[in-house]
Image: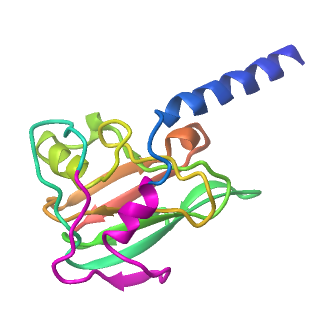
Amino acid sequence: MRFIGFTALAAGALMLGACGGGNKNADTTAAAATTTTAESTTTAPAGGTAAAAATPATGTATAAPVTGTVHEVKMIGDEKGYRFEPASVTIKAGDGLKFTNVSGGPHNIAFDPSQIPADVQAQLNANMPNTTSPLTGPLLTQPNETYTISFANIKPGTYEGHCVPHLALGMKISITVQ
């Protein structure tokens, strides 16, 4: 019994450590930069702007606004497990992904720098407003909170992402940029 209690305590400490003290209101600001609807796919306004980014992971880049379609990805934790829906998405360069906390939060979206090509890291990080650390978005703690990432100026390829608090539970997403 003590081992189970210790495991739960350690898991809780890890989850709190993953928080990084990010801005809890950042998600709504990020979403407002590209879309104001809850529809699964919307078109970003012409000439929209993205929020300024934290220090890029590698090199420097300027945040590039969404110039195409914004696709919704749901972040879910329920009796079926922790997951992104869809778990695999194909988008065009210039599109955006709006991550919505549906249940089981806190959730976030992060990319492992060792899995992202060096020439993409700075731009992807710049396109992720209000990061808590390089390539790591803020925690979404409340249902219906959103966080939008622009994939403008991101070269074609497949990018593997995950939810930091639920990585050990298999909460991963594959994003293919065409």
Query: Measured from the top left, where is residue 97 in percent x and y?
Result: 36, 67
Tell me the colour scheme of the image: rainbow
Which quadrant of the view contains residue 111?
top left
Whether the magenta-drawn stretch holds residue 42 is answered as yes
- For the question of whether residue 147 can be seen, the reply is no
- Residue 161 vs 20, above or below: the answer is below
Q: Position of residue 63 (x, y in %)?
A: 17, 57
Q: Residue at x 20, y 67 (%)?
A: 65
* Residue pictured at 58% horizontal, 27% vertical: 14
Does residue 80 appear left or right of residue 156 in this picture?
right
Q: Is residue 159 rendered magenta in the image?
A: no
Q: Which residues are magenta?
A: 26-52
Q: Is residue 21 left or right of residue 4?
A: left
At 26% from the left edge and 72% from the top edge, which residue is drawn?
95
Whole-percent x, y for residue 58 in the image = 15, 36
Q: Which secondary structure type mostly characterizes the magenta part of the structure?
A: loop
Please indicate, yes or no, whether residue 111 appears anywhere in the rendered image.
Answer: yes
Q: Position of residue 106 (x, y in %)?
A: 60, 48
Count of numbered tags: 0
